[in-house]
Every structure is written in C-alpha cells, then in structure tokens.
Image: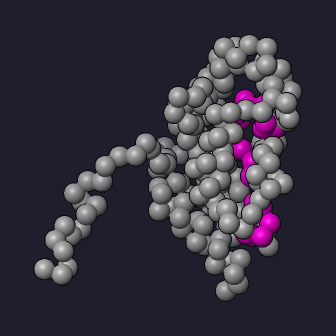
C-alpha cells in the first residue's frame, strides 16, 4: 500500500470516527461524498450539504478537489458546479492538512466568513455586499429548499453535532487497569 493510499484511508477513518457520514464511490476509491452540517450561528445553520471529495493520486502532497453537490448560495461557491474558491485548498495546501481540517475548519470558516471580493457566484457576492440581511434571507431559503435533511437524500444522516458529553456506554471501563 502506497503512502498516498494509507493517508487517504487514515483521513477517511478520522472523518468517520468524528461521526461524519462518508459515502464511497464504487467506481473510484479516490472519490467520495461527505455530509457537512451548516455552522451554528450562521444563516447556513440547520442545513446539510453533500460535499464531493476527489483525492489526486499525489494526495496529501496535492490538494483534494472539493465541491458541493447540494445547491448552496455562497459568494465563493459556483452555483452551477459546486466548485469552491478557497485559498487554503486551492493555492496554499500543505501535506500537514488533512480532510478533518477541510470539514471541521476550512469549509465552516468559508461559510461563516464569505469573501465577496473573490467570488465564484457574483450574484451572491453582490447581495452580500449590498445588504447582508437580504443575503441571509436568501441563504436561509436555499437551506430550506435544498439542504434540509430529507432533501439531501439520506433519512438519518450521522454527522457531528455540537460537543456532547460522552455517555456511560462510551466509557467501557471506568476502573483503572492498574488496580
């Protein structure tokens, strides 16, 4: 198994251990879909997006290709293709980053802090710059129309929630093994 394949497997396992829903593609082991939950306290809150990930054969030395399959209204996401304009993925990728960084930091930050000066969706950027309240209303309407749980195509998606305390069932042994 190559370093690239081991890293890919490790990254997918990390996502699944953090309770992300990962759907693999039978045609290619380098293409899969991850469900992303909209960040709390944002107009995207309550939405769930299918995000397509394609890993190049040189991953992690080359960045993954990330695209929203679920329609999203955002200045830095192309409405037709779902392509994402995000410097950390497109230009300044480092092998130190992993897919967990993409789904827990980079994409949530993109949704929380759009960059309308470098748009892929000029309509969204224009509305964002002109009237943030109107922008939030349009985003919420898109969330309702396209990114609600039943519309995403998975009945009960397993995606991470806010930090919740672990239940007793998740602590298999509370006694010290050294006693």
Relative placement, left or right, of 85 versus 29 is right
Camera-side residue: 157 or 78?
78
Establish if 129 lies above or below 118.
above
Which residue lies at the image location 60% right of the left edge and 34% below the top edge? Answer: 147
Splitting the image into 4 quarters, where does residue 64 fall? bottom right
* Predominant SS of the magenta segment: loop
Q: Residue furthest left?
A: 179
Is residue 138 depicted above or below 33 in this figure?
Answer: above
Residue 52 at what x, y percent from top left?
70, 52
In this rendered view, identify the residue nearer to me: 22 or 121.
Answer: 121
Residue 6's place in the image compared with 155, above or below, is below
Question: Where on the picture, by quarter, is residue 120?
Answer: top right
- Residue for point 65% across, 62% down: 98
Magenta span of residues:
59-78
Q: Is residue 33 magenta?
A: no
Q: Position of residue 159 (x, y in %)?
A: 49, 48
Residue 67 spot, x, y in % from top left: 75, 48
Say whether residue 158 is visible: yes
- Left or right of 13 in this view: 137: right
């Amino acid at each position: 198994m190559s370093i690239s394949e081991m890293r890919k497997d490790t990254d997918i396992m990390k996502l699944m251990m953090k309770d992300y829903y990962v759907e693999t593609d039978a045609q290619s082991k380098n293409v899969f879909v991850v469900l992303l939950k909209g960040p709390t306290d944002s107009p995207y809150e309550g939405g769930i997006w299918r995000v397509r990930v394609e890993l190049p054969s040189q991953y992690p030395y080359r960045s993954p290709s990330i695209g929203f399959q679920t329609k999203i209204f955002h200045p830095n996401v192309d409405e037709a293709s779902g392509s994402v304009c995000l410097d950390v993925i497109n230009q300044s990728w480092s092998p130190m980053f992993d897919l967990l960084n993409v789904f827990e930091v980079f994409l949530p930050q993109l949704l929380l802090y759009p960059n309308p000066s470098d748009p892929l969706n000029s309509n969204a950027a224009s509305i964002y710059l002109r009237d943030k309240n109107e922008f939030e209303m349009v985003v919420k309407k898109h969330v309702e129309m396209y990114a609600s749980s039943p519309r995403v195509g998975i009945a009960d998606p397993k995606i991470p929630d806010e930090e919740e305390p672990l239940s007793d069932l998740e602590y298999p042994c509370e006694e010290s093994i050294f006693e």
